[in-house]
Image (spheres, grey):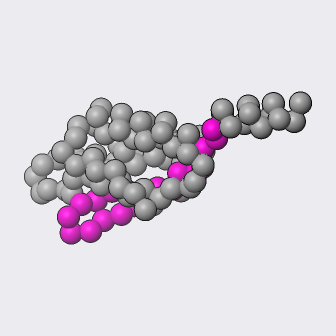
Amino acid sequence: DFELNLTGLDLRHALESIRQMIDRQRRRREIRSVLIRLDPPVPGEGETLFRPVGKHLVELLKKEMISRVKPYADKECSGFVIHLPAGKDDQVEVVEDEKSL
């Protein structure tokens, strides 16, 4: 459904972008599928962000902040496909609670 392009970013900025995406999802009522794009591996260039971002996503999965994660790769990039659970809109819940009083 959606794409988060992290190509060209360092690890700190990539993790911050993921954090912001998770934070925005908390205010949405629908489940979202997101393709997270990372730079592809380049021979002789060292480690890519694939492993550290993957570890971070597994931690988010354990905390139930994402509901699914699977690796993704094509000719242009590597990355992950994740599923974000529907968030809760606190203001709507308060209004609904007040109506029942």
Is 89 situated above or below 83?
above
First to last magenta residue range:
71-89
Q: Position of residue 76 (x, y in %)?
A: 20, 64
Please tell me which residue lies in front, 42 or 78: 78
Residue found 74% across the figure and 33% down from its top: 95
Residue 85 painted magenta: yes
Image quadrant where residue 34 sits = bottom left
Residue found 43% across the figure and 41% down from its top: 21
Q: Outermost residue toward the bottom?
A: 75
Compared across the picture, whether 27 is left or right of 100 comes to left
Compared across the picture, whether 51 is left or right of 77 comes to right
Please tell me which residue lies in front, 17 or 50: 17
Residue found 51% across the figure and 56% down from its top: 32
Q: Position of residue 63 (x, y in %)?
A: 59, 40
Q: Position of residue 90 (x, y in %)?
A: 66, 33
Q: Outermost residue toward the front?
A: 99
Q: Position of residue 74 (x, y in %)?
A: 26, 68
Is 99 situated above or below 55?
above
Residue 34 painted magenta: no
Is residue 56 visible to the viewer in this orientation of the structure? no
Q: Outermost residue toward the left?
A: 44
Residue found 18% across the figure and 45% down from its top: 8
